[in-house]
Amino acid sequence: MRNNMQQTIKFGAERLTIEDVMAVANGSSAEMNGCPEYQAKIDRGVAFLERLLKEEGVIYGVTTGYGDSCTVAIPPNLVDELPLHLTRFHGCGMGENLDHQQARAVLATRLCSLSQGVSGVSHDLLNQIVTLINNDIAPRIPQEGSVGASGDLTPLSYLAAALIGEREVLYKGEIRPTAEVFAELNITPIKLKPKEGLALMNGTSVMTALACIAYKRAEYLAQLATRITSMVSVGMQGNDFHFDEALFAVKPHPGQQQIAGWLRSDLQADCPPRNSDRLQDRYSLRCAPHVIGVLQDSLPWLRQLIENELNSANDNPIIDGDNERVLHGGHFYGGHIAMAMDTLKTAVANIADLLDRQMAQLMDYKFNNGLPFNLTGAEGERKPINHGFKAVQIGISAWTAEALKHTMPASVFSRSTECHNQDKVSMGTIASRDCLRVLELTEQVASASLLAATQALEIRKRRNELDEQNMSLALKTMNELVLSEFSFVEEDRPLEHDLRHFMARIQQQHWMLY
């Protein structure tokens, strides 16, 4: 896949991938397709619109008001001012700002949509977005205020404002006035042509940008949850045969089979099975491939939904410059992203719940096959005053509960708005934001679970209950990598710093897993 962070991503040529968006989000540069055929296509759309304007044709959002105001005719002498007003009256976003990575992803997704060549925008506009990307300038975009149709109007107005030198941008770790940054870098603000304000704002690019980020984090979590499950299985002296290849051949979900295969590899399941006198482990171990497999099997079709939306023209109206037609429709509706994110957040929350149940077993001396209560590392007379991971498990329960609470689908909460013109909306941006929150909570659970599983393995080793030679290279390596940054908990200490550190490692996708 194209995931080299140093590469330059070309827009207006081939279909882009989630990985291309992530490359730009993480610092890659951008360029426009420079071939004459593509350049001419952009020119034809702009020229067609200009001819229509001279003929005083009626063009929605160009010579009319917006939404419910589409019956309001705009006097010819005010047409040029209309897009500026559109950007300004939508400047009412609230909540926290998107972070720098997320805002760069928005630049990439909007540029990809407009680069389809059917939005009637000029080379100047496309190149201005490229300029922002390549100078690492990101618009300050508040998270809240979009109902997901007519697209992400309010958050995308902040992108439009940045292109024309208004509002604020994120630059070198600071929020600064756009005009000030532009002056410093000798960047000239553009003036929006009559259709360009609408083309910039009337689309699904914020929800799609967040969906790309969510997808990659979920993809990694499926792998990490599998590795943690392997570690917990060893720590619990669980059964390898639950993941037998012949067993999974009779339930042929490919993602589920993949997870079982990873577990077999981690557990060296070709060796004699451990602890076979206990016939069946509890579901959180025995059914781990089935739980994680749901996420793994969902990824291909979620990718299809996200990447089709990414590579779509999703504003209104569509400008068919080749056939000289203005096509009025509703491609700004973000239903596919809403469904993808509502589905993904549910699958991810189930991962949190799985790890929570594994931790409940691992901490409880009644079920953990001889490990000390709460995985305390203390021995002798100091053991009674030490409580190990007791409070961490409470935290895991809290984070899991909050993740599960956020799984209510956002897409079913459509509200009629804007004088009932927008009477059925997608809530796709809220679904994407919810998904990112569920991912964050699940990453917290994974961070704590990884440290607890490492503690369990270390306890077994110190008690001579685990021979490292019987561990797979993957598990030995993972254990060593964690212990290189985490000290065994022998005496009680605050673990917040450790949890935050490994949370960051997870979000950085620090370890190569499978």
Image (cartoon, helix red, strand yellow):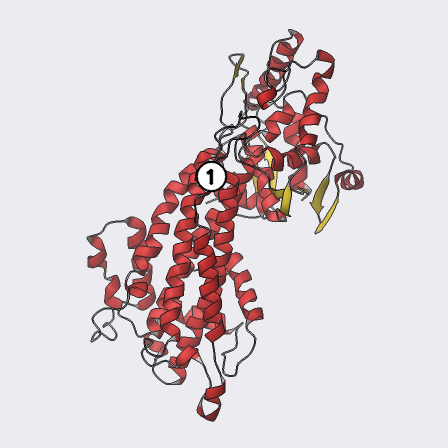
Q: Residue at x 67, y 8 (%)?
A: 54
- Give the quarter of the figure containing the N terminus: top left
In the displayed image of the protein, which residue is found farthest to the bottom? Answer: 381
- Mark 1: few, some, or many residues within 10 Å (few <14, many ≥20)? some
**What's under tag 1, amino acid-wise?**
Phe
| Residue 227 against residue 114 in the figure, above or below | below
Identity of the residue drawn at 75% across and 39% down: 178
Classify the position of the C terminus by image quarter.
Answer: bottom left
Q: Is residue 26 left or right of residue 334?
A: right
Quickly name the residue at label 1. Answer: 413
Q: Is residue 216 visible?
A: yes
Placement of 118 over or under 172, stated as above or below:
above
Q: Residue furthest top?
A: 55
144 relative to 275 in the view: left or right: right
Q: Position of residue 270 (x, y in %)?
A: 25, 67
Q: Which residue is depicted at the point 50% across and 28% down?
A: 423
Q: Position of residue 349 (x, y in %)?
A: 42, 54
Give the percent coordinates (x, y) of residue 422: 52, 28
How many numbered discs sit on the rendered protein?
1
Mark yes or no: residue 509 visible.
no
Whether 194 is drawn above or below 211: the answer is: above
Q: Is residue 27 left or right of residue 427?
A: right
Question: Foreground residue, 359 or 504?
Answer: 359
Q: Quadrant of residue 169?
A: top right
Q: Residue at x 45, y 53 (%)?
A: 405
Residue 19 horizontal/vertical position (percent):
49, 44
In the structure shown, which secondary structural element does the residue marked by tag 1 occupy?
loop
